[in-house]
Image: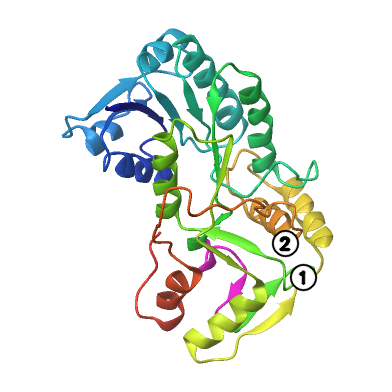
Amino acid sequence: MTTTVLVAGATGDIGSRISRELLSHDVQLRVLTRPGSSTAAKLFGDDARVEIMTADYADHDALVAAASGVDVVVSAVSGIRPVIVDAQRALLAAAVAAGVPRFLPSDYSADYRRLTPGTNRNLELRREFAADLDAAPIQATSVLNGMFTELLAGQAPMILRDRKRVLFWSSADQTLDVTTKDDTARTVALVALDADAPRVVEVAGDRITARQVAELASELSGETFKLQWAGTTRTLSAMAAVGRRLSRDPDETFPAWQGMQYFVSMFSGEGELRHVDNQRYGRQSWTTARDILQPWLTGTGTPAA
């Protein structure tokens, strides 16, 4: 039986990967796009299995029409409050009004449920929307995957390649959950097709500590990478707070201080995944930290973005 899936944010980085994975299954895909945007048509216009639905998030009736007859709504929108809370609330309301059975929110992150208030803006917005989702008459599933593994290769300030250092905060032995974007997208597609999926599905392509990252970097590069204590997570949280106050663009989705907050969540252990189940959908091929770091550290190529 063909499943009809509506993907919001299908033209974004994660959304396009999720859409690609969904199209490898027996689905009828609807992609939600804003009026005036031509990106969806460029990406999906030649695929007969894809229906492009145009709706503004402020237009409830148009959203309901887009969601009518859908089996599951998958949100892959990215942003801060106007998107993660406001737009998803509008999408949720439309899904409920259209009688959609299931909803997957745009989480794809570390576990936000135990975070200390005020320590991670982006994840706390997801927690805020999760409360709305739990109160709605719809079956919901969140996919939690830790941090995207690709960020280890230069984007996240943890591995200082030129200085041969690996930074850590508080403990070099704190487990860090990392999953590539493609592995996350594959999981989301499988969850979308799983009518019996639980409220939360946790996966981790790799689980690694800063100490193990230093050992791995040394092995792959042939040079010695040393651990460098960068302070406590409390100190890092205070630095992030200062960065946030001094920020010129408070509406930026991923400013440097948000990256600091993410490391606070990970190195404090509050965001650690506690119920990882990589086998829920059978044997899968998971991309490891080694797979991502090897081309970056050895100069044999660049890891997938």
Residue at which label 2 appears: 267
Q: Residues within 10 Å of mark 2 (few under 14, many from 20)?
A: many
Question: Residue 282: x percent and y percent?
Answer: 41, 52
* Residue ID for mark 1: 171
Magenta segment includes 157: yes
Q: Is residue 161 above or below residue 280?
A: below
Query: Magenta residues?
Result: 151-163
- Dot 1 falls on a residue whose secondary structure is loop
Q: Which mark is residue 197?
A: none
The kind of residue on which mark 1 rests is: Ser
**Label 1 near label 2: C-beta < 8 Å?**
yes
Q: Position of residue 74 (x, y in %)?
A: 44, 31
What's the residue at 79%, 61% (across, down)? Answer: 233
Quadrant of the frame with the N terminus: top left
Kindly tell me whether residue 210 is visible in this rendering. Answer: yes
Asked whether, in this view, residue 49 is left or right of residue 217, the answer is left
Q: Nearer the viewer, residue 47 or 177?
A: 177
Camera-nearest residue between 5 and 252: 5
Query: Helix, strand or loop at disc 2?
Result: helix
Numbered label tally: 2
Residue 180 pos. (x, y %)? 46, 57
The x, y position of residue 157, in whole percent, is 61, 67
Q: Is residue 251 magenta?
A: no
